[in-house]
Image (spheres, rainbow, N blue to C red):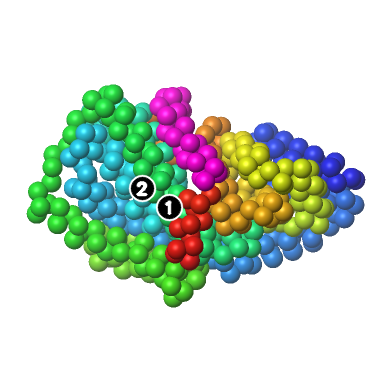
């Protein structure tokens, strides 16, 4: 079977299986089997060995650690204390709870690394508060959902870990590359919220007294130090990202128990929930890595590089083409398999155009993160509907301005790579 035909078979079988509703993990394994049959090399041992070798990566251990750390914090009252502190800081301005949602997402991003966890934890706390303050429920939910996209950009980031594994680049440098873009996203969303709050004439909250401010600050200081420990430790080479995940887990457990909001008897429940999520993520990751191995031996990356080689001399045209593909990919595929399957392929393409692999990793993750809040597959959308108590249609209609702002940030970073590369050269 010719290389171009294998590319069509790969894409057609993958999206065809997803379209008819086959679960993503099984879809990936079936795609691997279909490609091996087409090449005349089918052997179940190949797939099983690829799954085992794919999952047997030390770096992937960071994922269950960060998932567990996020789960401990969700049960340990940390998110509640963070929201109280940020509310005391900015809750008194017009539409203050909207700014609280965005800033809380920035801080929580340094704790969980997951958009789903961010939307679930902060949505459950803030949406009832915003509705009680007179905010439109659908608009409040849309803001929470949009702000949750910051979590996979600011370190620690589970998608960045996956990209680092797939593209074989430094996860520490990927983490550092996400700081400035994450802050730009927050500023852009706050600017958008300013006009929405002004249009709807949302009231300002009560200004916290100095005593109230210091009380909330002292109550959240343990949680506020966690991003500093993680980022600082990785930046100065004290520990690896995987070790940072283990340290984050222990630290989250100590802080949650110290706050007396996580009882010892609840820890088995927390561990069970985290293990279920970890199992789902790593099953998909192992299946995706097996597909990545099969498409590599099939020569599909080489064919795609050849097809895009005409754009290699025009970096902007190449980046815009890849971004259009990734935005569409994010609409129909979850972020984990999308990164693990396509990162090695696209990394080869951008390498031929001499585009920095770390910069491209940030751009790829941001594209696919935007896909988390776009129909029909957007995982965070469904979380938002559940915690916000709104319909899918109501949420989409109110999400549009925030979505356009995030796409605008993406285009800004594509047009001006120095916004990523210059700060990265300072910090790492």
Q: How many marks?
A: 2
Viewer-side residue, 398 vs 263 = 398
**Nearest to N terminus: mark 1 or mark 2:** 2
Front label number (1 vs 2): 1
Kindly identify the residue that appears in the image at 37 percent across and 38 percent down.
Answer: 189
Whole-percent x and y of residue 396?
Answer: 45, 28
Q: Is residue 85 visible?
A: yes
**Residue at which label 1 appears:** 180
User: What residue range appears in magenta?
Assistant: 391-416
Secondary structure beneath label 1: helix
Left-right relation of 231 to 360: left
Kindly identify the residue that appears in the image at 54 percent across and 32 percent down.
Answer: 375
Q: Residues within 10 Å of mark 1 (few under 14, many from 20)?
A: some
Kindly identify the residue that appears in the image at 84 percent across and 57 percent down.
Answer: 43
Provide the major secondary structure of the magenta segment: helix
Q: Is residue 269 visible?
A: no
Left-right relation of 13 to 175: right
Secondary structure beneath label 2: helix
Q: Dividing the picture into quarters, in which one does residue 143 lie? A: top left
Q: Residues within 10 Å of mark 2 (few under 14, many from 20)?
A: many
- Give the label on residue 105, or none: 2
């Amino acid at each position: 079977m010719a290389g171009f035909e294998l590319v069509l078979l790969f894409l057609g079988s993958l999206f065809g299986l997803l379209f008819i509703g086959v679960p993503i993990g099984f879809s990936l394994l079936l795609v691997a089997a279909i490609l091996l049959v087409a090449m005349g090399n089918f052997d179940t041992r190949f797939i099983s060995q690829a799954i085992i070798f794919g999952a047997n990566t030390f770096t992937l251990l960071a994922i269950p650690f960060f998932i567990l750390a996020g789960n401990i914090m969700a049960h340990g009252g940390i998110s509640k204390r963070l929201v109280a502190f940020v509310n005391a800081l900015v809750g008194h301005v017009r539409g203050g709870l909207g700014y609280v949602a965005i800033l809380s997402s920035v801080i929580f991003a340094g704790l969980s690394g997951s958009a789903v966890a961010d939307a679930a934890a902060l949505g459950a706390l803030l949406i009832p508060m915003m509705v009680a303050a007179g905010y439109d429920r659908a608009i409040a939910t849309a803001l929470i959902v949009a702000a949750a996209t910051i979590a996979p950009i600011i370190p620690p980031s589970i998608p960045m870990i996956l990209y680092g594994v797939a593209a074989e680049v430094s996860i520490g440098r990927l983490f550092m590359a996400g700081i400035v873009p994450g802050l730009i996203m927050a500023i852009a969303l706050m600017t958008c919220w300013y006009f929405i709050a002004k249009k709807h004439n949302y009231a300002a909250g009560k200004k916290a007294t100095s005593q109230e401010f210091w009380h909330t600050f002292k109550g959240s200081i343990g949680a506020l130090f966690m991003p500093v420990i993680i980022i600082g430790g990785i930046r100065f080479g004290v520990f690896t990202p995987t070790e940072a995940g283990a340290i984050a887990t222990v630290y989250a457990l100590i802080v949650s128990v110290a706050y007396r909001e996580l009882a010892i008897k609840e820890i088995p429940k927390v561990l069970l929930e985290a293990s279920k999520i970890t199992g789902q993520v790593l099953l998909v990751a192992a299946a995706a890595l097996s597909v990545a191995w099969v498409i590599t031996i099939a020569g599909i990356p080489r064919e795609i590089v050849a097809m895009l080689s005409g754009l290699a001399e025009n970096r902007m045209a190449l980046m815009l083409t890849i971004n259009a593909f990734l935005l569409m990919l994010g609409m129909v595929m979850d972020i984990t398999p999308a990164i693990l399957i396509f990162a090695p392929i696209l990394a080869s393409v951008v390498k031929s155009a001499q585009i920095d692999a770390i910069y491209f990793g940030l751009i790829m993750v941001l594209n696919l993160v935007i896909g988390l809040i776009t129909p029909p597959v957007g995982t965070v959308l469904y979380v938002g509907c559940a915690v916000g108590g709104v319909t899918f249609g109501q949420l989409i209609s109110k999400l549009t301005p925030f979505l356009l702002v995030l796409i605008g940030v993406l285009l800004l970073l594509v047009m001006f790579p120095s916004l990523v590369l210059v700060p990265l050269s300072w910090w790492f």
